[in-house]
Image (cartoon, grey):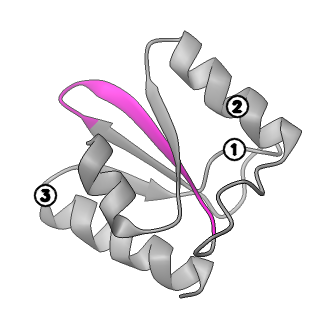
Amino acid sequence: MSESKIQKEIIDYLEDSGYYVVKVIKANKSGVPDILFCKDGKFCAIEVKAKGKKSNVSELQKIHLHLIAASGGKAIVADNLFDVIEEF
């Protein structure tokens, strides 16, 4: 499944679950995760990769995921909807 289809599946799931969700198309910083959302008052982020490509996270993306986690948010890399359901 393509990255864009996985993103849509994840966004639909999160929105159907009642979360505030933003799909990042262009940010003022490179490497910002693809999906940002709020769950139970906590900032969450998901970097979406095509199926089987979870290890293809750039160093800049890793930095952003780390900064989010270090700031008290939750950030993951997902290549399918189940990753998201399992974590959130």
Q: Residue at x 42, y 77 (%)?
A: 8
Q: Which numbered disc covers residue 64?
A: 2
Callouts 3 and 2 close, C-beta under 8 Å: no
Q: Residue at x 76, y 28 (%)?
A: 63
Q: Earlier in the sequence, mark 2 or mark 1?
A: 1
The residue that label 3 is drawn on is 17
Which comes before the other along the chain, label 3 or label 2? 3
Badge 2 amino acid: His
* Residue found 84% across the figure and 47% down from its top: 58
Q: Residue at x 84, y 38 (%)?
A: 60
Q: Are marks 1 and 3 in contact (CB under 8 Å)?
A: no
Closest to the observer, 27 or 75: 75
Vertical arrangement, residue 77 with respect to residue 29, above or below: below
Give the amino acid at mark 1. Answer: Val
Residue ID for mark 1: 32
Q: Is residue 44 magenta?
A: yes
Residue 16 pos. (x, y %): 15, 66
Tag 2 and tag 1, C-beta contact below 8 Å: yes
Q: Secondary structure at mark 1?
A: loop
The amino acid sitting under disc 3 is: Ser
Q: Is residue 53 left or right of residue 31?
A: left
Front position in the image: 71 or 56 = 56
Question: Residue 74, percent across and down?
Answer: 43, 28
Residue range highlighted in magenta: 39-49
| 59 on left or right of 44 | right
